[in-house]
Amino acid sequence: MARQRQIAMFRPRNRAATAFALAAALFASPPVAHADGSGHAAHALGTVQFPVSCSPPARQQFEHALALLHHMTYALARKEFATLAEREPDCAMAHWGVAMTLFQPLWPTRPGPADLERGAREVAAAQAAPQQSERERAFIAATAAFYDNAGPPQYWDRVRRWEAAMQKVHAARPDDDEATLFYALAHLAVAPPDERQKAYADRAVELLLPVYRRNPDHPGAMHYLVHATDVPGRERQLGEVVAKYETVAPHNAHALHMPTHIYTRLGDWPAVVRGNLRSAEAALAEPAGEDGQYVRSEFAHAIEYLAYAYLQQGADAQAEVQVRRLRDEPRVEPTFTTAFSRASTAARFALERRDWKAAAALPVRTPDTLPWDKFPWAEGVAWFARGLGAAHMHDIAGAQAAVDRLAQLEEAASKSGEEIFTRNIRVLRLAASAWLAQARDDAPQARRLLTEAAELEAATPKHPVTPGPTLPAYEQLGDLLLEQERSSEALAAYEHSLQLYPRRFNTLQGIVRAARASGDNARADAAERELHDVAKDGTRKPALE
């Protein structure tokens, strides 16, 4: 039997343990035992096997860094690959590993010029290494396709070149698990941001399941299967894999968080809370940045999911704790994920509670230390909240200003080549425009715009950065139709929204009200029972009249 190695962390104690302990005590989240106080030291990451043409100690460290790469723990993986490359400059795959950490296919992070230059240097060093197998040369050549500056310069052109190259590696080596895993990851990355995404997810599952069956402890097999399951219609199909991934790396922030994508799709709010409390703690326990000066952006990501889950349960006080927790932490990495989570948690906290005054006054581009010009969708979330708040307060000028700014941000995203960001901003703009039309007493225009927003949103895949739309457009359509006293149509819109985003507090509340108004008391009673079950531990009382 081929050798397999159980990967464990071996980092020394670091000062972040103090922050972790304080956060655990302050927020009363489940304790996480640390053998030596650090976020990953001596803890499992799963099982990988990738023999490389390096010294025996280097092979062990390479596989350890590779496990981190499969968990998308990019910064830590980069440090380990770079340390190995410095110690053994002729270890080709160590240089390959550094290059692989500098672009993150499923994440919204984009490599800047310095990253692209460094990646190209590392690929060149890998190609120049004197000892490398045919297999290693194939992996290095595939990564070189991403960093090739001779082709189109756009980020997504680079990703598509990498996917095509990995497809060739997989075709030449169909029984090579690592080739299959990276091809599946690349295939997920290039999925179009529309209804075709499911076909790409189906193909990825087809590739990944045999790898998982051969090695059910492989972090990449589990992780990428969870991503492939994060599409409508698949959320109930791989529960065993989802549950297993939650346990395979019990002190890795991303591994703890990732299963909650599926729990969110199922409306299992206690499981979302459980996973993200642990993920946030794990992120605090391992600093980021070249000098350890930042809190990992996984912290912000986990906080958004926490706030979302608490709000669906009507647990507004707990949600506010998380919103403040993120707002008051100034050291989170200055990434897209951080910017989005900052804007989104604040917007959700106002909008889910229907606090239109707070929504209309929501700050934008805060904190000003983040490079907001790079993050039009994140900024757009704040303007959407402002627009809805202003429209509901009949502040026509304020709502119009929000719509105008959303149009500018949509154009900026389009020019950058980020189609999925553009589509999401367009949904926000159409919805805000609909509520502006409603405030202007143009009911037909309001319905038309919000229907267009809902159809576009339903045809746009959910981006991994967010637990769901800022406010589901079909839920908003139900609200609008109920306000226009079109209760039967409102009920249909709410039901459609519930199919996409189950066990949402406001959707269930809308169903109760619309069903009662249209005389469907049986449906109203059923929805009311489900609502009380969802919010049984919350303090927000449903508005059912």
Image: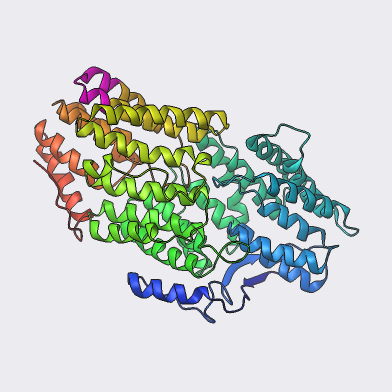
* Residue 462 visible in this rendered orientation of the protein: no
* Residue at 74% across, 67% down: 83
Q: Which residues are magenta?
A: 435-448
Q: Nearer the viewer, residue 155 or 31?
A: 155
Using the image, determine if residue 296 lies above or below residue 55: above
Q: Nearer the viewer, residue 388 or 185?
A: 388
In the displayed structure, does residue 379 sit left or right of residue 206? left
Q: Is residue 373 above or below residue 221?
A: above
Residue 313 at x, y percent in the picture: 25, 54
Image: 9 above or below 492: below
Q: Residue at x 77, y 39 (%)?
A: 148
Q: Which residue is at a point 39% across and 53% down the rendered structure image?
A: 304
Residue 81's x, y, as percent? 72, 63
The answer to whether residue 137 is left or right of residue 245 is right
What kind of secondary structure does the magenta stretch mostly adopt?
A: helix
Question: Looking at the picture, how far across and down is residue 188, in whole percent?
Answer: 58, 42
The one nearer the camera, 365 or 508, is: 365
Residue depicted at x 45% and y 45%: 234
Let me know if residue 447 is in the magenta part.
yes
Quarter of the rendering occupied by the N terminus: bottom right
